[in-house]
Image (spheres, helix red, strand yellow):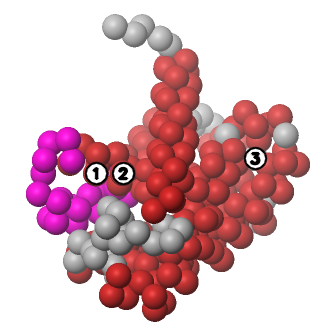
Amino acid sequence: MLNLPLPKLTQVLSLAVSALIVKVTIEVVYGYVNYFPPNFSSDFLHGREAYFASRYQWAFYPHIAFGPVSLLLGLVVISERLRMRFPRWHRWLGRVHVANVLLIVIPSGLVMAWDAVAGVSAMISFVLLSALTWGCTALGWQAAMQRRFVVHRQWMQRSFLLLCSAVVLRVFGGLGNALEVPWLWFDAVISWASWVLPLSLFEAHLWWNHRRRRGTASPVAPFLTEELRTN
């Protein structure tokens, strides 16, 4: 059994999650051989031949081109170590990341959401996911412009968690295939679980940390504690 101090364990888990994100992203990109030209017998494009040539392809290709960029670049800009060591790079790469998400990845994902294969429930899930990701990213950018950096980091962490729903979705999908779960209803369920579950855990983590800080805050000058947290 591992017997690591909490900071070290957190670092190990962060590295493991980062490695998983990179691994799944590479696997997704490797599968692009089925998209140039479109192979409608492949897993993702199966059943989309009837409407692919309409608006769908104009959203699909930008999404698969810039979606992996948002994941890999997101890993870089949310890294505390890189932010502290290379603050200028953090700012410039952060601007590129925000522009990519707000202007390409989310709008194209929103168009694709209306043609979700797993039905209306999955369509609603992906539309909400797109709206929340766009909102979190925009609020994170706004907080950075206002120099509210603690709030900025929290919004961008939410944004990245929501972007990583694509990774979680593929992990759940792989488990479903291994367990031979009926795909139609399962795909609808994991379309929600891929982002609701990670976001709920993140919000619970923030709530717990806030409660713990309130319990240990100085009763003499609580405003100083809050001021230090926001700088």
Amino acid on which disc 1 is placed: Gly
Q: Which mark is residue 170?
A: 2
Residue reaching furthest to the bottom: 54
Say what secondary structure mark 3 lies in. Answer: loop
Q: Is residue 186 magenta?
A: yes
State the mark number for residue 231. 3
Q: Is residue 90 above or below residue 216?
A: below
Compared across the picture, whether 15 is left or right of 169 comes to right
Give the x, y percent position of residue 109: 48, 74
Looking at the figure, which quarter contains the N terminus? top left
Contact flag, marks 3 and 2 (Cβ < 8 Å): no
Q: Earlier in the sequence, mark 1 or mark 3?
A: 1
- Residue 158 shows up from this direction: no
Q: Residues within 10 Å of mark 2 (few under 14, many from 20)?
A: some
Q: Are marks 1 and 2 in contact (CB under 8 Å)?
A: yes
Residue at x 45%, y 88% (from the top left corner): 53
Residue at coordinates 49% horizontally, 29% vertically from top-left? Answer: 16
Query: Could you tell me residue 104's position as x and y percent?
Result: 62, 74
Report the Cα–Cα distance between label 1 and label 2: 5 Å
- 132 displayed left or right of 45: right
